[in-house]
Amino acid sequence: MPAAIAAAAAAIRGPQQAAYEEAGFTRRSVRMPSGEEVSYLSRRSTTDPPERCVVFLHGMTSDALGSAAAVVPIASRQPPGVRILVPDAAGHGKRHAWAVRSSWEGLSLDDHMSDVEAFCAAVGASDGTVPVDLVGYSMGGATAFALAARHVNGSAPAASRLPVRRVALLAPALLVTQELYAMTLSVQRHGGVERCVYNYRTEAEAEEMLRLVG
């Protein structure tokens, strides 16, 4: 990497890392069933087990570290008994090289959902005992939306089912279908999810999203 680019990257990443550290996050990694080592940022809870677990799914071309501006304000509103996980999405951050295939086909929404399921299982967030809140931005919003639909309607295998309690979507990517939208609303009406916020248009709606995840 040219020195000028490396210096520019350090100037951006340094404050992001500092913001996470000040908010109590540490960099960790976990080995997935595929053998891949996945990096993530974690704020541990002060209770065992945690009161609940918040999983933040970032947008396309970003990564966990680059999401500090979105994650840290949300984290600051969480009680100390809440565990917070911010994984690098498949094909992003240090995971890019692992995702590139000899014949590049990209990653589908189902690929991303399966990846989040595998990650949650690997870090012990899907044992069914701790409620999970999904917060997704852009591409991560589409993943969170579809993932919640799959897990709260019973279509996910019981052994890997996430006990999704809340879903908050920040400017979600348009990767959802009318079927998924209808399915999620149906689940919400039947009490499968306490509250689902799809987006916000005003400052008041943004504050409501923060209240829901806090």
Image (spheres, rainbow, N blue to C red):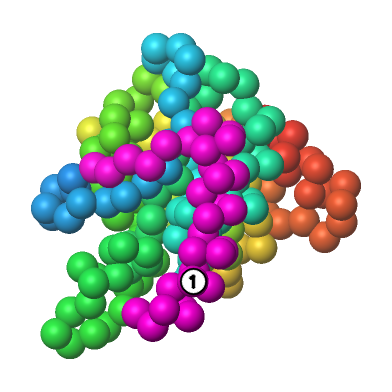
In this orientation, does residue 196 appear? no
Task: Look at the magenta stretch and give its main secondary structure.
Answer: helix
Please provide percent x and percent y for residue 176.
52, 66
Q: Nearer the viewer, residue 47 or 51?
A: 47
Image quadrant where one finds the N terminus: bottom left
Please provide percent x and percent y for residue 47.
46, 12
In this orientation, does residue 40 appear? yes
Decide whether residue 135 is among the magenta residues: no
Please provide percent x and percent y for residue 208.
79, 41
Q: What segment is highlighted magenta in the picture?
A: 1-30
Q: Secondary structure at mark 1?
A: helix
Q: Dot 1 corresponds to which residue?
A: 7
Q: Nearer the viewer, residue 39 or 126?
A: 39
Q: Is residue 105 left or right of residue 79?
A: left
What is the quadrant of residue 160 in the picture? top left
Decide whether residue 12 is among the magenta residues: yes
Please provide percent x and percent y for residue 74.
65, 40
Residue at the far top in the pictured view: 48
Q: Residue at x 30, y 55 (%)?
A: 115
